[in-house]
Image (spheres, rainbow, N blue to C red):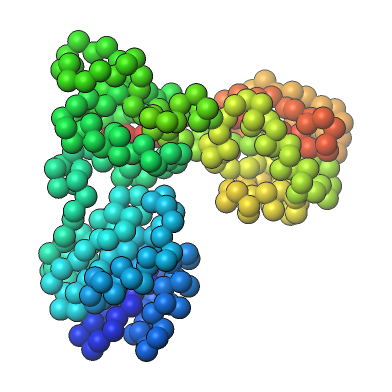
Amino acid sequence: MKVSIIAFTDNGMEITYKLSNSLSGTNDVDFTRCGKGALSTWTEEHFSTNDALIFIGAMGIALRAIAPYIKTKTKDPAVVVVDELGQFSIPILSGHIGGANELALQISKDLGSIPVITTATDINKVFAVDTWAKSQGLHILNPECIKLVSSKLLKGESVHIKSDYPIQGNLPKNIYLNDLNNPNENNDNNNDGKYDVIISHYDLKNEYGNDTLLLVPQVITVGIGCRKDISFEAVEKSILNIIKHENYHILSINALASIDKKANEKGILEFAKKYDLPFNTYTAEELKSLEGNFTKSEFVESIVEVDNVCERSAVMKSNGKLIRRKDTCDGAGVTVALAINNPNISWE
């Protein structure tokens, strides 16, 4: 987590030194003392590149500084204000998804300060779906629906979640999983036969989305083979067409995989960079050692010493099962296969 701290006074700098020391163990921390007229420049520079900002000073100063740069709750960094005596730590932006509440609690432990948490789900001790989604690595497609789920829980009503994958642990209070008609449920609200939250790797935004919170796990590995010096455009078009054809969401991809001979293929590397995905490669011997029913090609084997690259690499990386066999992508010089493995999701 990249954290930047700014202070304005001598007292504030003393707090800054303490926090820098305590937070540096698990975070990348930098700090500065604000010079005259430098706050706007500092905030603009760090707001878009940092995971968290900590202001040591008055809340009004922090609010005015960040106001021009606030975008969405899924992208904004955590922002916490600490007074210059270290008496209070106050999250003012991205309390749940950005982690500002958690950071404020950590600061309170480090300084012996009082955390001032104002988010309703926290102070009422009810399940916070956005915090939970972040902790489980689930992408939130329509954050505007978070308030609909939280509102039900704050009123003591039931929230129904449909998941394509098993979820370990005990259900939180008033949460029902894959069950719209539980006989033990209080008839406190009419769910109209609809789920409040859906967890799936499918692209469901056109089917739901207006009043159903959509969460997407990263569960799909793309295995890829290609001719030498393939273009980024060919790689991107091929992968996106396959994903769209299967109606999977692009955010469900967790990695790219191929043979080690493609480790420096610029087109694949550019795609991995653009979509922020790891690119893993394996030797021919590693791929051949994988047991299973794969689409064989004598031509591929004559070139790279293994009968299939895309299917084998996808399964090897995912440690799962094929859900889309080798596709030659209309002669684009790219072959793509998809594998899936269930995410490790827990209520804890």
Residue 67 vs residue 187, the one in the foreground: 67
Residue 299 vs residue 192, the one in the foreground: 192
Q: Is residue 298 above or below residue 264?
A: above
Residue positioned 36% across, 37% down in the render: 145
Residue positioned 20% across, 43% down in the render: 121
Residue positioned 71% across, 48% down in the render: 268
Seen in the image, is 324 located left or right of residue 232? left
Residue 286, image x, y percentages: 66, 39
Residue 115, image x, y percentages: 16, 61
Residue 90, image x, y percentages: 21, 63
Residue 273, image x, y percentages: 63, 54
Location of residue 322 by image quarter = top right
Seen in the image, is 13 located left or right of residue 234? left
In the rendered image, is residue 154 in sight? Answer: yes
Q: Quadrant of the N terminus?
A: bottom left
Q: Is residue 187 above or below residue 23?
A: above
Location of residue 337 by image quarter = top right
